[in-house]
Image (spheres, rainbow, N blue to C red):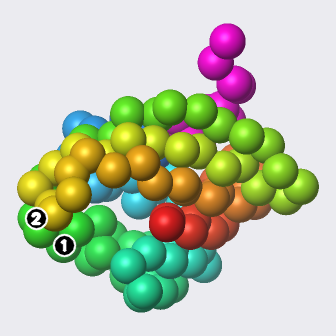
Amino acid sequence: MKAQIPEIIEIYFRASNANDVETLVSCFSTDAIVIGEDETHRGTAAIKGWSVNVRKKYEFKAEVLRAIEKPGAVVVTAKLSGTFPGSPVDLDFKFTLKGKQISSLEIG
């Protein structure tokens, strides 16, 4: 049985797989933070830049495997396949939501 994933997180993964950067960025609050690959990206302009660059670098797709609700967060495990060493790999995406938007995302 698949866990219920908040709609904004489903939209995030659909947009990511479609390389739809504009829709992906619209999932985040204006003051959101993304942490991944030992870098922190603050605000939607920085998140957009990160999103464009990471897609050029790795050309990946994500398959959601499972989701777990934790206090104050939703942790989604996804299999990423792309042009990076060790592909495919399972990564955890820890989402914190503010209203109906993503306020933070930690990938690792």
- Name the side, left or right, on which 69 lies relative to 82: right
Q: Is residue 69 visible?
A: yes
The kind of residue on which mark 2 rests is Lys
> Where is 39 relative to 22, above or below?
below
In this view, the residue in front, 96 or 81, is 81
The dot on residue 53 is 1
Q: Based on the displayed image, in which of its 4 quarters is residue 5 positioned?
A: top right
In the picture, the disc for residue 29 is: none
Q: Which residue is mark 2?
A: 56
Instruction: In the rendered view, tell whether residue 28 sits above or below residue 31.
Output: above
Where does residue 68 sit, x and y in percent of width and height?
73, 40
Determine the residue positioned at 21% across, 51% down.
87
Q: Secondary structure at mark 2?
A: helix
Q: Residue at x 26, y 46 (%)?
A: 88
Quarter occupied by the N terminus: top right
The amino acid marked with disc number 1 is Asn
Q: Is residue 3 magenta?
A: yes
Residue 39 placement (x, y as % from top left): 42, 87
- Which stretch appears magenta? 1-11
Relative to 76, say whether 108 is above or below: below
| Tag 1–tag 2 contact (CB < 8 Å) | yes
Name which quarter of the figure residue 13 lies in: top left
Residue at 56% in and 77% down = 33
CA separation in Å, label 1 and label 2: 5 Å
- Callout 2: 10 Å neighbours few (<14), some, many (20+)? few
Return the x and y of residue 27 as percentages of the image width and height.
Answer: 51, 53
Q: Is residue 60 visible?
A: no
| Residue at the top extreme, as displayed | 1
